[in-house]
Amino acid sequence: MKYGPLVSMLLLANVLCFNSCKNTEKNEQDKSMIIEHDFDQTPINWVGLWEKRVGKRDLMKSVIRQFEIENQHLRVNFKFKEELDREFDGYKYVIEDSLISMIKSGNYAWDIFPITRNTYKNIAKKLNDPDWGAKYLVDFDQYEWYHQSHIDHVFHVSSIREGYGGIYAGPLISGRNYALWYNEETAKKIGIEIKQTGMTMDDFIGYCKAVYEYNQSSTDKITFMPDYKLNSQVTDIFNNLVLSEIGSQYNVSNKDKVNKAIQKSLAAFEELSKYNPINAEVNIDKDFVYILNGQILFEEKPSSWFNQCETEDAQKSVHLIPAELPIFEQSPFLYPGTYQSVWAVFKAAPHKEEAVELMRYFSTNDVAERWLSTTFNPTGLKVKLKSSDFGQNKIETFNTYIEKKYGENLRMFDLGELLYGNSKVTIEPEAVFRGKTKADKFYQQIKK
């Protein structure tokens, strides 16, 4: 269904109804979310995320309930973004259009709302204002408690602010470290032991060769990596190889070294392509299902992807292990990962101060520790003690290793802009990885 320009105002009416006339119904449906009292309460209207992510969803409900118990003068009117999506038949721009409508009309129905980097960017285009966040959103940089509750190095990575118009739009509870996820049961079946850290490109090619040889004599076919959404995965692996060969940020100005690093990485991809990394006999259309079922060896995904798998099948997901992206000989000077604001608060929100207080509550040490133990995702919040300090979980151990190893160098980057100062230079060598073109031919195309 295609919605016209009135969708935002319709959504506002929907939200206002949600904030008032549906409160009684909501209390009956989910008493764990709202605590009823006999005295007047100030509402905090919140559109949140993760309805289908069991661990994150339950954490949200639990923390909101505890907040209401400790702040009985406040009531959290909470609704999942996914509920809004359903009400508007999955209309893609429900959040974006409604936020724009609120900004233009000055009628702010929501106090707290979800905002990803892509959402921010899309709104910036529609408003023709890349700095709209600084004008309309609370900048949490002004609060001392915000600095005290976050790990130090998030304040030294400029890209965290740049994604939101130069501000800290909310708690950086959600972190994303990229990894090569593999199913340890599948690795055992093939007869290989995968390095969780320090994997070289020779190791990576060797694993691909092992899958190829396994498929020659087995009817139970496996693909080294999935055909589904392959381009971004291959690009991240390639970027890591290039930066590991360059070796240092200081070598970026040495264009001869940069070009040789690109050629070496492409040649490695050409070598790997000999072993059929994309097996056409395994038809991938929903990647996490196939890796859970043992039909894929590797997926390059962020840490948050694990929760999708966990929601799909909690028992099978325990066999998923993250591994560091492959290198040549030395570690790269940057590694893909980030911390992001998940929610934001309008400066002109009707219950701004109460919403900020709720965000402060979500930034506490207790919530951060529960986030780690529940979601197994990294966080930009400080914690006193991680279960990974005792080696209890391979995912937590991996995240701690990556964060300690790369620190402020854990960030998202554009390879063309980093190496050539031009974001229009795109290097996406999927065709070489697939064996559809030779390394030298692809390199010549880059030079042009």
Image (cartoon, rainbow, N blue to C red):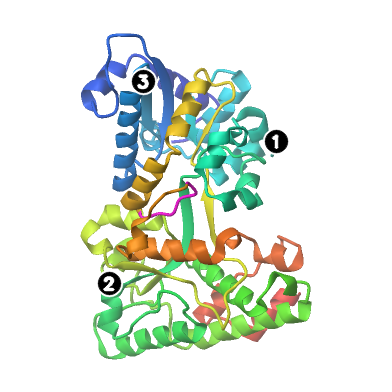
- The amino acid at mark 3 is Arg
Residue drawn at (34%, 31%) of the image: 64
Q: Mark 1 and mark 2: span between their CA atoms?
A: 47 Å
Tell me which label, 1 or 2, sits earlier in the chain. Answer: 1
Q: Are marks 1 and 2 in contact (CB under 8 Å)?
A: no
Q: Secondary structure at mark 1?
A: loop
Predominant SS along the magenta part? loop
Residue at numbered disc 3? 75
Q: Nearer the viewer, mark 3 or mark 1?
A: 3
Residue at numbered disc 1? 129
Where are the magenta residues, as a range? Answer: 376-381
Q: Quadrant of residue 127?
A: top right
Tell me which label, 2 or 3, sits earlier in the chain. Answer: 3
Residue drawn at (37%, 24%) of the image: 76
- The amino acid at mark 1 is Asp
Q: Quadrant of residue 179?
A: bottom left
Q: Quadrant of the N terminus?
A: top left
Compared to residue 70, the image places residue 210 above or below, namely: below
Horizontal arrangement in the rendering, residue 363 relative to residue 336 (left or right): left
Instruction: Give how far across and how far down residue 425 sits, in percent.
Output: 71, 65
Tell me which label, 3 or 1, sits earlier in the chain. Answer: 3
Instruction: Give how far across and how far down residue 24 sits, in percent.
Output: 27, 16
Compared to residue 186, the image places residue 90 above or below, namely: above
